[in-house]
Image (cartoon, rainbow, N blue to C red):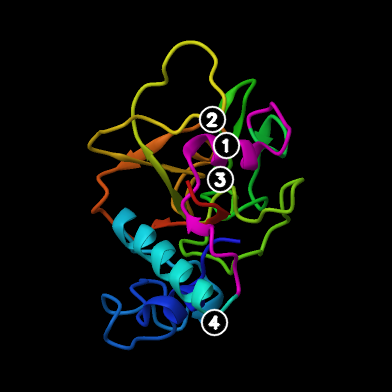
Amino acid sequence: YLVTQGDYLAVIGSNPSYFRNGIDGTNNGGTGSTITNELRHPVETVSWFDATNYCALRTQQERAGGLIPTNYVYRLPTESEWEYADRAGTTTAFYLGSGLHSGQANFVGLYEYDASVGTIDNPGGICLGITTLVGSYPANPWGLYDMIGNVWEWCQDWYDVYPGGSVIDPQGPASGSVRVFRGGIWGGNAGDCRSALRDGNIPGAGGSFIGFRVVLAPGQ
């Protein structure tokens, strides 16, 4: 699953998200009654620095509690790990197939997509305009939820053009100015959710459209 507001609150002690329950004065005016179970919604309005800080603190806490081996760490996925996990063995535009249609994930369903024709207008499509509870839509073939839509997901890598040739487990460029995020967004079109679609922002950026998920792996 995506890291939830509840996960983030338990580790960091605060919740920066915009999509919160009611209006509590801490979330840019609040979202009224549109959110009623904020702790199960994905955390958002987090920068890349916030996300990596969460990983470091969760690693520290769970090592101290004996919950993970001492040589394991939580971290953001690399961009290649993210796409490999998202595709789950598929080679089509989405792990669902060549198309993505309204109701299959949390995106702006007014604008569907099929690889054979591109964007498809659907005036009756679903547009929620908010995040949804994690796990609201079926998982991909490897049991991973919300790889399509809901919030963009920070990855470890700096953003740059792909190098030529084949590589195994690439770790991304050594430097840059923009960090990668993947997966599409509640406020974006179906085409933004394609498995191959890349985007990014400066690591200090945040907003109600960016969250993250974590990898637990041996430390490097």
Q: Is residue 62 above or below residue 181?
A: below
SS of the residue at dot 3? loop
Q: Quadrant of residue 87?
A: top right
In this rendering, the answer to whether 144 lies above or below 101 is below
Is 153 one of the magenta-colored residues? no
**Type of residue at label 3?**
Pro
Residue that badge 1 annotates? 83
Q: Residue at x 72, y 39 (%)?
A: 96
Front-most of residues 42 and 57: 57
Closer to the camera, 160 or 150? 160
Task: Using the numbered discs, state the Cα–Cα distance from disc 4 to disc 3 in whole angstroms.
Answer: 29 Å
93 to 209, vertically: above or below: above
Looking at the image, tell me whether mark 3 or mark 2 is earlier in sequence order. 3
Q: Residue furthest front?
A: 70
Could you tell me the amino acid type at mark 2?
Ala
CB of mark 2 within 8 Å of CB of mark 4?
Answer: no
Q: Which residue is mark 4?
A: 37
Q: Residue furthest right?
A: 141
Mark 4, Cα crowd under 10 Å, few <14 / some 14-19 / many 20+, is some
Kindly report which numbered mark, 4 or 3, lies closer to the viewer in this rendering.
4
Q: Are marks 1 and 2 in contact (CB under 8 Å)?
A: yes
Q: Nearest the camera: 158 or 141?
A: 158
Q: Nearer the viewer, mark 3 or mark 1?
A: 1
Residue at image mark 2: 196
Q: To which quarter of the image does residue 133 belong?
A: bottom right
**Who comes first in sequence, dot 2 or dot 4?**
4
Q: Earlier in the sequence, mark 3 or mark 1?
A: 1
Cα distance, mark 1 to mark 2?
7 Å
Rendered residue at 39%/56% (across/down): 209
Q: For the residue labelled by badge 1, is the local secondary structure a helix, a strand or a loop?
A: helix
Task: Give the residue type at disc 1.
Answer: Glu
